[in-house]
Each structure stands twice: as structure tokens, then as C-alpha cells.
Amino acid sequence: MSSTFDAKTWLGQIAADMRAAYARNRRVMSFAEYLTLFETDMPHQVRSAAQYLRDVFDRYGTPPCAGPAVR
């Protein structure tokens, strides 16, 4: 007894999961929503240039360097 793959049901479940994840995480906000968040939680929404640069290195790392070329 083999089960048949139902692509329509599978895609429907994926779409439902994506809608639920979006509703839960709210990754995309309008500018007005962001301003409201900014007003209520300013310390977590702003950072200095130095903090931003450190976050970039923490996120992406740094390539290994062999050092200066010696002749």
C-alpha cells in the first residue's frame, strides 16, 4: 500500500506555515510600525557606527591574513 504524494496539499501546508511564521515574527513592518517600535524601545533600535561595524565583523567574521609580504 503506497501513499500518493499530493503536491497541492503539500504546497498549501508550506504556505500556511509561512503565514504563521510571518504573523509570529513580523519581519516586515511599515515605517509607521517601526517608528512606534523605535519610540518604545530606542536603546535596542539604535547603535553607533562603531557598534554597527563590530556587529558586521561578529556576523560575517574576518578573512585570515598572512601578514605583510617580506622580501
Image: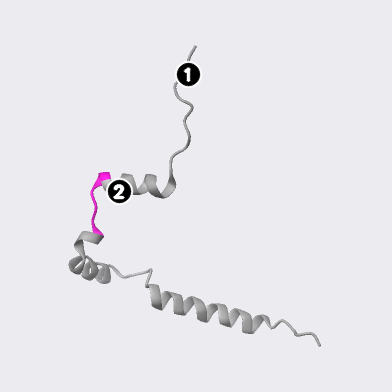
Which span of residues is magenta-colored?
A: 45-50
Residue for badge 1? 69
Residue at the image point whose x is 75% and y is 84% from the top: 4
User: Can residue 48 be found in the magenta stretch?
Assistant: yes
Residue 52, labelled with which disc? 2
Q: Is 21 located above or below residue 71 in the figure? A: below
Residue at the image point whose x is 44% and y is 21% from the top: 68
Q: Quadrant of residue 3?
A: bottom right
Give the x, y percent position of residue 48.
Answer: 23, 48
Which quadrant of the rendered structure holds the N terminus?
Answer: bottom right
Q: Tell me if label 1 and label 2 are in contact, CB under 8 Å.
A: no
Give the x, y percent position of residue 28.
Answer: 37, 69
Task: Report, in whole angstroms, how far the alpha carbon at label 1 lies from the one at label 2.
Answer: 31 Å
User: Can residue 49 be found in the magenta stretch?
Assistant: yes
Give the x, y percent position of residue 35.
Answer: 22, 67
Disc 2 is placed on an element classified as helix
Q: Residues within 10 Å of mark 2 (few under 14, many from 20)?
A: few
Q: Amino acid at mark 1?
A: Ala
Q: Quadrant of residue 22?
A: bottom left
Disc 1 is placed on an element classified as loop
Q: As drawn, is 3 to the left or to the right of 67?
A: right
Q: Earlier in the sequence, mark 1 or mark 2?
A: 2
Q: Amino acid at mark 2?
A: Tyr
The outermost residue toward the left is: 39
Q: Is 55 located above or below residue 20 in the figure? A: above
Q: Is 24 located above or below residue 48 in the figure? A: below
Q: As drawn, is 7 to the left or to the right of 42?
A: right
